[in-house]
């Protein structure tokens, strides 16, 4: 069942009335606590409203303009059927992975290729997990992505239905990457709200790769909320590749929680999108943890990409590294807002943050803002931001060694992005990303 | 035909009303080693930059012929392909650009321009090892990003290493000796001497006479105020070491 959003009324009201109409359609409608959370969420959404530029956190990204369009709110699990050939360009075949394909936020089993999983590992849709593993879902669902101050997280929570789910039990190692391929399809201008939950228990190790693509020319909006739990001594690598094309906008909210001695690394790359807002929050709820937040934005045309990160150190003796880089061409815009919070008593924190941008044209824009909030006195926190052009001295050096001006520029840009690309620890994925970047840069200097 | 012939070269800085070279004349034959000395700001490095094709300089008058060709018509990469090599005074650090990949691309683009076959990876690595050995360059440096985190001496050695890999016909060394300790100075000089042969011309730009104790030049030119104020044989370098540059300035002034 789908509901067309009437554009004559306030966009908030459209969602609220759609919520009332589709009351029974949500995830695990029988589960009382999730059902109650949905009610609370829509109420909170109604109070908060869609963020406007008046809010500091949304100062440089006008999301209301993008949301205020006649989207179709998709609530039915049946997506359009896709052939393997439709998704062939996105499957990264060199990467041997447990592959799950989601079309419009729902798992498509015929396109998926999960293969053999270690004993006890669950890889399924969130809806299925809600039925088969209600205890795990209830323990973690909605615990990390707080909707109290985030209207779009509240909206997602109100409409929650389905998405991706991983459970890696204590002490289990998943050697191959788990690959979620998200595809938006169909002729309608869809408003999608997938919800993902990744649970990596104590001592477990997993690598998750998510890629977002679109096979429709229709204007779409995806409001994703993704939660991750990284247990004691666990290690989760989490990669996100965003490449949905010029007609797709999205808000992608990712909230992770770490326990003692764990490592959580995220790496987000944005190749395309109309308006892309990423909220990445990590709460380090344990000591002796390592957190890594990496990101790249390869902006072109009129892309608008906003990365908001929040690194919450609420326990002592941890370190976090954050590096976001942008290469902005044409009239693209990037926003980076990196917040680091160190609470009282969280001593011996080593938090590092860096944001570097190359602007290739006079019309590209970067807004960068570090925010450090530190309430402990024995910490090392640093931040830095640079903005500039390609180093012409480097270009001349390369040319003086026989490389063409074009090759020199491509090489210099690749070298700039390499600092983030080299953090891809899955070789075939790194090669895939590096090649995509190379092709993009090559197209700039045709 | 001379390998390099510079006639009445006048050079200024683009968009600024500054003139740096005021009529330089210089002829270098194949097989020759010429040194250009001179005080700070006399225009030595500008001459090197113009020869390599740096765009911020504007040639106001005069001409440069390289192997009979109009050098000023060529892009920097074309000059490299034709066999012109500049060892930079300040080699650029290129984080993220792997030394091996960069040099392979560089060597092969120059080889292609000369009608030579591309080197295979194995041949290239072999050649890289041999030349690094020859120059006493730590082979580990070739596994890093170009010049990144190299010491001053390593950067200069790396320039000579690239010279050895690219086998140019005209090599311009822009203050390659500056800032080197005695070991690095000797190894750079040894490298240059090994690469010296009848087919290659060298233009060594330097501030000090000391490198010329190891690399013996055929001619020494003194540049002052954007002109070659005096030329002589290797003894001129020693005279300069003893007496400085002022006496030349006085002689030039007296003659004027």
Image (cartoon, coloured by chain):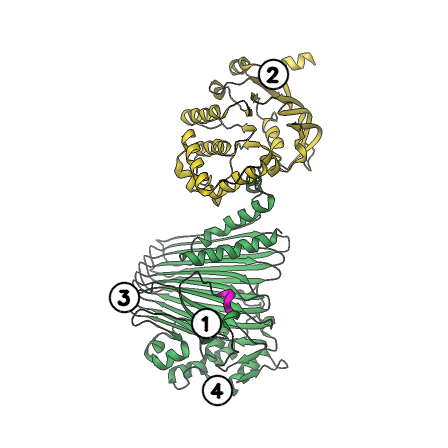
Chain colours: A green, B yellow
Badge 2 density bin: few <14, some 14–19, many ≥20, Cα 10 Å: some
**Label 3 chain ID:** A
Range covered by the magenta-colored residues: A87-95
Q: Residue at x 45, y 83 (%)?
A: A26
- Residue A76 coordinates in the image, percent (x, y): 50, 82
- Tag 2 residue: B231
Q: What secondary structure is found at the residue carrying circle 4?
A: helix
- Tag 3 residue: A171
Residue A186 located left or right of residue A25: right
- Residue A443 coordinates in the image, percent (x, y): 60, 54
- Are labels 2 and 1 on one chain? no
Mark earlier in primary sequence (3, 4): 4
Residue B131 located left or right of residue A169: right
Q: Quadrant of the C terminus of chain B?
A: top right
- Are labels 3 and 4 on one chain? yes
Q: Residue at x 28, y 68 (%)?
A: A170
Against A343, residue A444 (above or below) is: above
Q: Is residue A146 visible?
A: no
Q: Quadrant of the N terminus of chain B?
A: top right
- Are labels 4 and 2 on one chain? no
- Cα separation between marks 4 and 2: 94 Å
- Are labels 4 and 1 on one chain? yes
- Residue that extends furthest to the left in the rendered view of this protein: A171
Q: Nearer the viewer, residue A298 or B33?
A: B33
The mark found on residue A23 in the picture is 4
């Amino acid at each position: 069942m789908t509901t067309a959003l009437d554009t004559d009324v306030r966009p908030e009201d459209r969602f609220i009335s759609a919520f009332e109409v589709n009351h029974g359609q949500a995830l695990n409608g029988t589960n009382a606590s999730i059902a109650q959370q949905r009610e609370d969420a829509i109420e909170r959404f109604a109070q908060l409203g869609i963020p406007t530029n008046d809010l500091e956190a949304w100062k440089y990204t006008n999301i209301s303009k993008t949301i205020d369009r006649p989207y179709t709110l998709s609530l039915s699990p049946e997506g359009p059927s896709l052939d393997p050939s439709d998704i062939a360009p996105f499957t990264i075949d060199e990467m041997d992975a447990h592959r799950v394909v989601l079309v419009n936020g729902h798992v498509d089993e015929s396109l998926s290729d999960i293969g053999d999983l270690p004993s006890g590992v669950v890889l399924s849709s969130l809806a299925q997990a809600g039925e088969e593993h209600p205890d795990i879902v209830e323990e973690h669902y909605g615990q990390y992505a707080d909707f109290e101050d985030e209207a779009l997280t509240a909206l997602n929570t109100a409409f929650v239905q389905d998405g991706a789910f991983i459970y890696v039990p204590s002490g289990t190692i998943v050697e191959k990457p788990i690959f979620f391929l998200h595809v938006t399809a169909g002729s309608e201008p869809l408003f999608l709200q997938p919800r993902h939950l990744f649970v990596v228990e104590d001592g477990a190790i997993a690598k998750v790769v998510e890629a977002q693509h679109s096979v429709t020319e229709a204007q779409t909006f995806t409001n994703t909320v993704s939660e991750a739990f990284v247990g004691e001594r666990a290690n989760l690598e989490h990669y996100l590749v965003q490449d949905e094309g010029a007609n797709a906008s999205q808000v992608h909210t990712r909230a992770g929680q770490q326990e003692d001695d764990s490592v959580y690394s995220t790496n987000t790359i944005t190749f395309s999108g109309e308006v892309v807002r990423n909220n990445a929050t990590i709460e380090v709820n344990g000591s002796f943890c390592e957190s890594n937040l990496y990101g790249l934005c390869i902006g072109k045309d009129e892309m608008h990409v906003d990365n908001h990160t929040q690194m919450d150190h609420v326990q002592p003796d941890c370190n976090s590294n954050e590096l976001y880089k942008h290469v902005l061409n044409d009239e693209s815009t990037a926003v980076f807002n990196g917040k680091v919070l160190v609470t009282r008593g969280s001593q011996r924190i080593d938090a590092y943050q860096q944001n570097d941008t190359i602007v290739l044209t006079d019309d590209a824009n970067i807004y960068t803002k570090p925010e450090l909030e530190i309430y402990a006195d024995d910490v090392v926190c640093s931040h830095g931001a640079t903005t500039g052009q390609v180093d012409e001295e480097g270009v001349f050096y390369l040319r003086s060694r026989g490389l063409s001006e074009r090759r020199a520029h491509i090489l210099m840009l690749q070298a700039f992005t390499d600092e983030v690309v080299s953090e891809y620890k899955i070789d075939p994925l790194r090669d895939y990303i590096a090649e995509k970047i190379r092709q993009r840069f090559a197209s700039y200097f045709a | 035909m001379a390998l390099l012939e510079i006639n009445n070269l006048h050079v200024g800085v683009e968009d600024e009303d500054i003139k740096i070279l005021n009529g330089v004349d210089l002829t270098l034959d194949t097989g020759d080693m010429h040194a250009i000395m001179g005080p700070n700001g006399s225009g030595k490095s500008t001459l090197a930059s113009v020869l390599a094709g740096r765009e911020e300089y504007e040639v106001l008058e005069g001409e440069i012929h390289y192997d009979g060709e109009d050098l000023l018509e060529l892009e920097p990469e074309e000059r490299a392909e034709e066999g012109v090599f500049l060892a930079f005074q300040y080699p650029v650090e290129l984080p993220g650009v792997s030394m091996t990949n960069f040099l392979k691309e560089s060597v092969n683009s120059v080889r292609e321009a000369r009608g030579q076959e591309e080197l295979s990876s194995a041949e290239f690595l072999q050649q890289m090892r041999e030349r690094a050995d020859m120059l006493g360059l730590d082979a580990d440096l070739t596994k890093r990003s170009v010049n990144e985190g190299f010491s001053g001496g390593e950067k200069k050695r790396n320039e000579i290493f690239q010279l050895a890999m690219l086998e140019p016909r005209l090599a311009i060394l822009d203050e390659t000796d500056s800032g080197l300790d005695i070991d690095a100075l000797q190894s750079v000089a040894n490298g240059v001497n090994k690469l010296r042969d009848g087919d290659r011309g060298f233009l060594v730009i330097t501030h000090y006479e000391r490198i010329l104790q190891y690399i013996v030049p055929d001619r020494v030119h003194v540049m002052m105020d954007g002109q070659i104020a005096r030329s002589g044989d290797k003894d001129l370098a020693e005279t300069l070491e003893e007496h400085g540059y002022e006496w030349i300035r006085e002689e030039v002034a007296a003659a004027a």
